[in-house]
Amino acid sequence: MRQPETDPTAIKAAVREHYGHAIQTAGSCGPSDGDCCGSGSTSTEIALYGAETIAALPSDVVTASFGCGNSLAIAKLQPAEVVLDLGSGGGLEVLLAARQVGAAGFVYGLDMTDAMLETAQRNAEKLGARNVSFLKGDIEAIPLPDQAVDVIISNCVINLAPDKHQVLNDAFRVLRPGGRLAVSDIVFDGELHDLPVAEAELRTALSWAGCFAGALTMNQYRALLITAGFSEIELVVTQRYGANDLRAQALAAEGLLSAEVLQALDGKITSCAITARRPA
Ligand SMILES: C[S@@+](CC[C@H](N)C(=O)[O-])C[C@H]1O[C@@H](n2cnc3c(N)ncnc32)[C@H](O)[C@@H]1O
């Protein structure tokens, strides 16, 4: 039997390679075999961000997008806020956030993949965005000082990190007291032990880079947020994935998950809007 990948260095290398490749082929692909949901299709982005927002952007800025929700809709940014986007990819949400916070605000994008950072920088130049900066680094060790930002956004990234406890601790550290976390992420609704498959077998069959294999359950997410010190925690399902979405993940398509397991998983893997606050 295959074993799930558990080595953090190997997981990060695979994720970096996957998204380095994905950004280079963005906009030219059909349905993805394992990108987080968005997979660079304009119709997906219109559904997430609205036709007017998308029409105002160059098409290659739009297709450089791999999210599973709209973290800006969750964050409700205000003028002059300082924002950090964990796993900023091609920069779409950073650039939209930069417009919302205005010239008195500032937005950092953090990513570990060079090709993503290069694309994001190019996109910022195309749009003439001056109040943004793209940082290279790991969301498990955010390269910003303590209490540096008002809001942390993130779209379909935290599930990709091997050490989510460390990500949420570090997110708490860089938020100002009273600051908020507003994240879209893939989350299991329900308990894994209720499924007719062992957790290790399930995680092996799903794709880590495709955002399903590393996903937490809602209860695990809530527990890690509480441990990190967050309050006012809410997780709201925004989309449910069906058996067909699971079959589209390369390994599941190889028949590693039985029809019974796929049926049991139908609708259990979700996109969630996750909000929490660092107490003032
Ligand atoms: C699914 S894509 C989402 C990108 C972007 N948020 C969007 O909505 O288009 C995941 C991104 O997270 C980055 N990423 C994954 N794990 C990371 C980590 N540990 N540290 C920094 N960036 C990471 C990848 O390089 C990739 O750009």
Image (cartoon, rainbow, N blue to C red):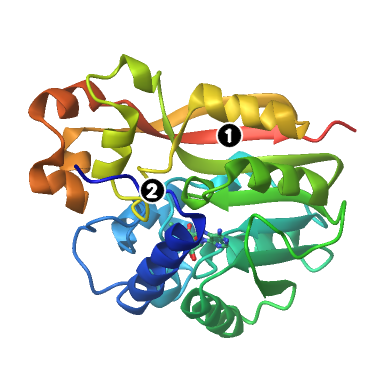
Q: Give the total number of marks visible in the rendering.
A: 2
162 to 276, vertically: above or below: below
Of the residues tagged 2 and 1, which is closer to the observer? Answer: 2
For label 2, the crowd category at 10 Å Cα-Cα, with few meaning under 14, some 14 to 19 and many 20 or more, is many
The quarter holding residue 22 reads: bottom left
Residue 99 pos. (x, y %): 67, 64
Q: Residue furthest top?
A: 194
For label 1, the crowd category at 10 Å Cα-Cα, with few meaning under 14, some 14 to 19 and many 20 or more, is many
Q: Camera-side residue: 40 or 97?
A: 40
Q: Residue under label 1, please give it.
A: 274
Q: What separation in Å lies between label 2 and label 1 (alpha carbons)?
A: 16 Å
Does the Cβ of the disc 2 residue fall within 8 Å of ligand 1?
yes
The quarter holding residue 108 reads: bottom right
Q: Residue at x 24, y 43 (%)?
A: 205
Q: Residue at x 34, y 75 (%)?
A: 21
Which comes before the other along the chain, label 2 or label 1? 2
Q: Which amino acid is tagged 2? A: Cys
Residue 231 pos. (x, y %): 76, 26
**Which numbered dot is residue 211?**
2
Look at the numbered discs 2 and 1 and tell me whether their residues touch, using CB distance below 8 Å.
Answer: no
Residue 260 placement, left or right of 36: left
Q: Residue at x 35, y 18 (%)?
A: 193
Please, what secondary structure does the residue beneath circle 1 have?
A: strand
Residue 190 placement, left or right of 90: left
239 to 105, vertically: above or below: above
Q: Which amino acid is tagged 1? A: Ile
User: Which quarter of the image is occupied by the C terminus?
Assistant: top right
Q: Residue at x 83, y 57 (%)?
A: 80
